[in-house]
Image (tube, rainbow, N blue to C red):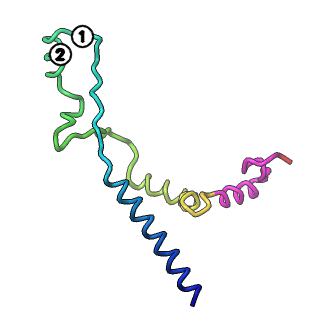
Amino acid sequence: MNRNIASALAMGTATAAAAIAAAAITCGTAFAESPTIETTPFVSSLSRDEVNAELKVPYPGGNPWAGRYDMFPRTSTTTTSEQAQSAYKMSRDEANALNSEDGGSAYFLKSATRSGANPSATMGGPAR
């Protein structure tokens, strides 16, 4: 019985202390800082007309603030879809290994052992 009372008192004290601390933190006032006043005058390297003329030159991919701005315009390629699919299928094991939980280290260890290379040197360990 005494343990329950002591435990309840300790818990009540801790709760009250937490409530008082939270109230003290939230009741504080915030003050804005003074603005930074720049004292050095700005000297432009271009005239107003030069800036206006520069703004009228169109962007290479179109207006970046437009809804249909293409940052990376498509370029022509000689690779066909079938070539890309076959290249992926040939490297599918490596792609799956690199996306696995160990990041492909087991795959690279296995491939180094098959090729006859020193696996510890391949994996970044000291050469034996």
Query: Which is more toward the observer, 93 or 104?
Result: 104
Residue 14 pos. (x, y %): 48, 69
Q: Secondary structure at mark 1?
A: loop
- In this picture, residue 123 sits left or right of residue 21: right
Residue 25 pos. (x, y %): 37, 54
Query: Which is more toward the observer, 90 or 113?
Result: 113
Instruction: Check the image and report above or below for 34 versus 40.
Output: below
Q: Residue at x 22, y 10 (%)?
A: 46
Q: Point out the residue furthest to the bottom here.
A: 1
Residue at numbered disc 2: 51
Is there a contact, CB below 8 Å, between mark 1 and mark 2?
yes
- In this picture, residue 52 sits left or right of residue 4: left
Q: Amino acid at mark 1?
A: Ser
Q: Point out the residue furthest to the right here.
A: 128
Tell which tag, 1 or 2, sits nearer the viewer.
1
Q: In the rendered image, which quarter is residue 31 located in? A: top left
Neighbours of disc 2 within 10 Å: few (<14), some (14-19), many (20+): few
Residue 30 pos. (x, y %): 30, 43
Instruction: Check the image and report above or below for 74 versus 35.
Output: below
Q: Label 1, label 2: how many angstroms apart (C-alpha)? A: 10 Å
- In this picture, residue 76 sits left or right of residue 1: left
Q: Secondary structure at mark 2?
A: helix
Q: Residue at x 38, y 50 (%)?
A: 80
Q: In the rendered image, which quarter is residue 110 located in? A: bottom right
Q: Residue at x 37, y 55 (%)?
A: 24
Residue at numbered disc 1: 44
